[in-house]
Amino acid sequence: MANYIFVKTRKTVESTNILQALEQTCNLITPVVIKGKSQNTVEVWPDESHSFYAIQNSENIAKPEKGALIIGWLHQSASDHSDTCSPKSDGSYAIIKNTKEGASFFSDQFGSRALWYYLDDTKLIVSTSQRAVVTLKGSFNLNEETLAWYLSSGSQGPFISWDKDIKQVLPHLEYRFNVTDWYIDSTQKPGMDLPPSGSTKMSDYLELYKSQVTKSLNQIINQYPKGQVLMPLSGGLDSRLLLALSKNLDLDNNLSLVNWGAPKQKGIFDDKVAAQRVASFYKKDLLDMSLPHEIDDYDQVLDRFIESSEGRIDHFNAFADGYKMWNEFFQSGYRMIIRGDIPFTEGLDINPIQARAHQGLELFTDYANSIDFSLKKYIDLQNEYVMKRLDGESLIRWRDRLYTSWRLPIVISAFSDQISGFTESRSPMLSWSLFNLYMGLPDKDKGDKLHIKKLWQKYDRSRVSSNAVGSLRSMDSYFNNKKGQKYLLDKLALLIEDKYLSSSLVESVHEVLSKQEFLSLEKQHSAVSKKALVSQKIQTLLSNHLPALPKAYLKSKRSKKLSVITIAYRMVLAEKVITMYESDAKSIKGSV
């Protein structure tokens, strides 16, 4: 998706100055590998002289219509403006509505399109980019709690920003801004209550699910000319169901299939192998993109990742090539990625520690080895959030509620942000109406994405196994060698005098890391391949024979430890994030 910015000023201002600042901001947040190659839209809001908007990388992007800027997409049934711009609309979107008297803004019910806002005495800023807000307000007020969460979990934490003054839009609320009072209020969205289990029949749901996802695919794919839509394909059920349904509609000729990852040794059935076999069965070409096994220039890769991800999550492993692959997609004319994001997850959690790990929001105190590092300052900074089961709530409903309330808006939505400067993305299976009906299924029919598995078995004729192992390398593995160790140790040595990271934490991590022994790259590759083989066998065995509850119980007995490599590279990333925001705040002379 593109990046969007909305500004409303309290007093009449010189529009030229605002528009110039917006253009500079768009250029700043454009990924470095496509700077000067993409176009931006920067304009005064129609019929409202106090309001302005900008769209970075705006090719094929709709401008405000009937007083609303729609970010993302709405299901066809809600695409006429009588329903559009309603907090009850279905789809994956964020919406900004504007009038002379005020404004309102909200995301979809999952928060799959993150919005951030800032209000002071002179202006309101709403944007999909935290960097844009910091740049336009002209200051950066570090939120140390976010730093603590980033170090412990690799995410910004529970609905907080790197800047204390910037707020994330909460998925269950609609925000209303009143110009007269110069005040933002929020109200609960209608239709957020979930139905009881047993109110939906699986037979009805399967047909409805297939029908709505098919309609969404038709809507999305036909919006773009042939050669502009990419569909990532892996060994998982989600992407393969989307391909099978597209094939069923004769839409697959308008799609280009792609898979990316680090190739493994022969004999490993991973996502890349599975994608090749599926594409071959359907007689489709596959863009088989290879990510490097090792990083040549750590600073280049991490700097580009931070600039695009804005510090929301630490998952740089899909961009270990420094965004060269995404630059290639952009240069080749691809303008839309169809993603298999879903509001359904797998497995069960027995306790809050497991639940937090499942959501990607681990506290430092969740780690059994937290005493290995000097963490007291950061433990004290973290505010524990409510993740308890409700009275009478089954483990499955608890799992599904937490996933949509926390992981989707905080982590999954960040995956789209990592590529937002390059291309739009659509997730046809992200539908609140379908999730609502899903929650009405009996718990026995939810399983591990059971409805998707049933549809996949019916429509995917390739019969390629779904038990492929992932083809992305772990973040740790890129540093788990002498070259990576030296890079981290050198960076940590420079951070001992850092004003934001405590010297005691830096020194404790440096000490532990310096004693770590590493395999050679050759032995490491061999170990990874052997581990993948063992993992694949265990995964197949457990999947076929062990029920979910015993699996969760066994998992709950394993203590969770924080790798010294993980906290070390997160500290390096965090320093880069903070430095970036400080630089952004000074990039335009005077705030808007």
Image (spheres, rainbow, N blue to C red):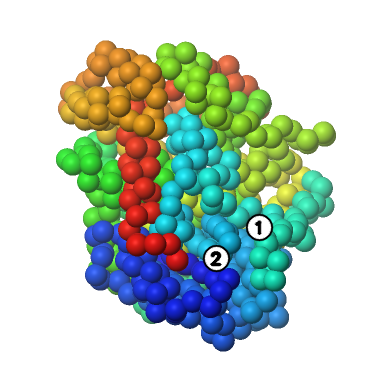
- Residue hosting label 2: 123
**Measuring 33% from the left and 18% from the top, which residue is drawn there?**
507
Q: Given the image, on which type of amino acid does mark 1 rest? A: Gln
Q: Is residue 332 above or below residue 400?
A: below
Front residue of this view, candidates 195 and 535: 195
Q: Is residue 458 above or below residue 347?
A: below
Residue 260 screen position, x and y as percent:
32, 51
- Tell me the SS state at disc 2: strand
The number of callouts visible is 2
Residue 232 screen position, x and y as percent:
39, 57
Instruction: Say which quadrant the C terminus sits in.
Output: bottom left
Q: Is residue 74 visible?
A: no
**Measuring 60% from the left and 55% from the top, which residue is drawn there?**
169
Whether residue 524 sits left or right of residue 20 in the image: it is left
Q: Is residue 322 visible?
A: yes
Instruction: Say which quadrant the N terminus sits in.
Output: bottom left
Residue 168 screen position, x and y as percent:
57, 52
- Residue hosting label 1: 109
Front residue of this view, candidates 160 and 22: 22
Q: Residues within 10 Å of mark 1 (few under 14, many from 20)?
A: many
Residue 202 screen position, x and y as percent:
73, 53
Q: Is residue 243 above or below residue 64?
A: above
Whether residue 273 sits left or right of residue 371 in the image: it is left
* Snapshot quadrant of residue 205: bottom right
Front residue of this view, candidates 218 and 204: 218
